[in-house]
Image (cartoon, rainbow, N blue to C red):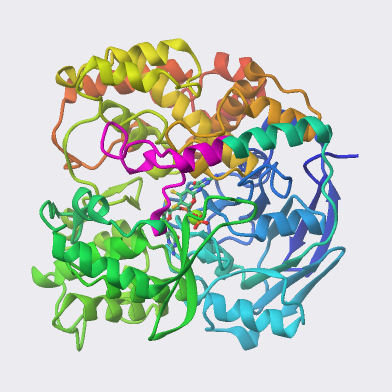
Amino acid sequence: MRYAETGYHLEIDLSRGNIERVETDLRLTELYLGGLGTNAKILWDRVPPEVEPFSPDNLLIFSAGLLCGTPAFCANRTIVSTISPQTRLMAFSMMGGFWAPELKRAGYDKIIIRGKSPHLVYLWINNDKVEIRDARHLQGKGTIETAELICREIKEPEAQVAAIGLAGENRVYHASIQAGKGSCSRLGVGAIMGDKNLKAIAVRGTKDIHIARPAEFMELCNELLKYIDHRLKNPLDKGVPTSQLATLGVQEFADPDEGWHMSMFAAGNARYRRKDFWTKEIAEEWKRIHEERLERLVSCYNCPVKCGGLVSHPEIKRRHMLKCSQHVRYIAAARSDNYNFGFKISCLGDEYGIDGFSAPTLMAFAIELYEDGILTDKDMPGFPSNDEDRFFYLLEKIVRREGIGDILANGTYAAARQIGEGAEAYDHNSIKKHEQAPLKLGMMNPFYYLMYCTGEKINITQIEGQFPQNPPETREEREDFIKDWIQVPNERIKEYFLNWEPRSFPYNPPIQACCEIVDWMEMMHYIDDCTGICTLVSSFAMKPPYHIHNFPHIISAATGLDIDEAELVKVTKRTRNLVRAINIRRGMRKADEKPPENHWKHRFPELEAKLLDEYYKFKGWDNQGIPTKEFLHELGMDYVFEDFEMRGIYSDN
Ligand code: MTE
Ligand code: MTE
Ligand code: MG
């Protein structure tokens, strides 16, 4: 009997129309947990670096996290992994909602998709019955529209459906996969799904998921709930050291105050901050519109937090769940102050299935090129005169790959190089060919510097959290903060925080401390992405309910594997290094590991160089950021260094 997981994968070959149910090896769960960890192992074993993103040999893996579907609160993430068309590195994209728990109840931990169907199809997984069905009649349909049509067709209103829209069908490099209350948004996972001619996956599951030690497990869950309840009633003060993430689960939609998002992030094509944007008048106007647009607050599966908003716009037929800030991102990029515009375009973007972070930056980039004469009316016939209309114009072109949209659909980095004539200089907010959240800040921050350089998802939200972004002014405030800081991995972290004088930044905390802090933050994200726990109650939140000291008990009671803290740290390192190894094998090197030049006004080149070198050493990587032979051996991953040696990866340095 397998616990927490089902012990089965579905292997689907779309070229041959073959479906197999395959029993998995428990040893792989012990070594890599599940979710992102075991996805990485499958990609390492089966997708060599020669495989192009749009090759039938590229795999598209939909995985439930290890704890999904168990009573562990907020265990609901689906982790989609493949090779990204944009970065050509490993993509791992997440969504919440209800899809992953449904897959587990149907009896599978993962669906591994290979090949390409000769025409558009969808999968219908109804417990043991799995079918590949014709989807030609769904061509061009929106993501939620597709889910509605499929549910009607299969006569199963309870089915959970993950689908692509026009953007995915047309292999737009930042196409997303949408599942009603969740979105696998970044790095073009929707384009790979479209390339495989897979429109959607509908799942219905009614089986049980077994827990190894149920009484102990439920007690741990009850403790978590008590803490979540406490945190919701006693949110950390937003103002002090902690940024907006201080509040548990962000709870974006409970709070219409978008002042932080609008003044912290950059406007247009990530050019400048509108520091005085958030006035009393705007706050009142946006609050009124927020109440109009918001139908109710909603949660993902088994989550008490309700951080999402079910929203609608009179001109868009279907309701969408928004969390966080993509609607605001569109407003800022379009230099608009119209809150309704944000709702309209992000609902439309979700229906077309497009990443709400990359898309606004890309559109603002196109507008800038037009304003500066690099793109002209010949490239954009009938281009409207105001930015909001221009965004709708560009959205339609991009998702259809029509005219200039065909170039823009390849993302800012590639489009800039295709357009030429100096357009490269306008692509100033990418790392590893991927658009970043538009932040242009003052002083270099050593934690964020390391996160931007080395993050494997190439997305800051995959590392940050836990440690405050800025120190509180006084020692008394810092002493107060550490009093109930049980989530830290060791007492040293508290010590670093205590001695963190605002004036000594960025030289204090010392480099060693920065390494430890960033490593801890990242480790927690990897645990979430393996177990399927939402980061907003874990790695991404300040003083969260899930942490390194209770995770081992929760995982052990659920799976029966008896993983203690030291072992969990080791398992996580294994996964983290395997993801890196996939990227190294695909050519990623130190030269790629840098934030955009103008990310901070004040840079510290010497300190930055030292930070990166020391962090590489701390992580067990060589001076190119490649995991060393000794370190891989320690992790029991000789197979990785043997492969590196065979390919001459070490000797190329
Ligand atoms: N949970 C995990 N495990 N991994 C993640 O990357 N991202 C968080 C949150 N939970 C994240 C996660 C962030 S920043 C947001 S805005 C929401 O998930 C996005 O939810 P969605 O992926 O369902 O759209
Ligand atoms: N794009 C769409 N369409 N919908 C979303 O909810 N969330 C944004 C961004 N793009 C979002 C989106 C946020 S807040 C984050 S942190 C990232 O996607 C999450 O990336 P992932 O879904 O690839 O893990
Ligand atoms: Mg997501």
- Splitting the image into 4 quarters, where does residue 28 fall? top right
Farthest residue in the front direction? 233
Pick the residue in front: 228 or 494: 228
Q: Is residue 208 above or below residue 518?
A: below
| Left or right placement of residue 160 versus residue 576 in this view | right
* Image side of residue 576 versus residue 418, left or right: right
Name the residue at 56% across, 35% down: 227
Question: Residue farthest to the right?
Answer: 1
Percent x, y for residue 38? 67, 40
Q: Check the image and report above or below for 534 versus 144.
A: above
At horizontal 34% and vertical 19% (from top left) the residue drawn is 480
- Give percent across and percent down for residue 366: 22, 68
Q: Nearer the viewer, residue 98 or 5?
A: 98
Q: Which residue occupies the foreground of this view, 639 or 394?
A: 394
Instruction: Report if residue 241 lies within the magenta region.
Output: yes
Please state the horizontal and vertical placement of residue 65, each as a whole percent of the image.
Answer: 66, 45
Q: Foreground residue, 592 or 440?
A: 440
* Numbered range of the magenta stretch: 227-253
Residue 269 left/right relative to 209: left
**From where the camera sits, is residue 580 visible?**
no
Q: Residue at x 55, y 57 (%)?
A: 299
Q: Is residue 218 above or below residue 612?
A: below
Where the C terminus falls, by quadrant? Answer: top left
Instruction: Please say whether residue 99 is visible from this viewpoint.
Output: yes
The residue lying at 16 percent from left, 25 percent from top is: 604
Q: Quadrant of the N terminus?
A: top right
Would you identify the image quadrant in which residue 355 lies?
bottom left
- Above or below, 590 against 307 in this view is above
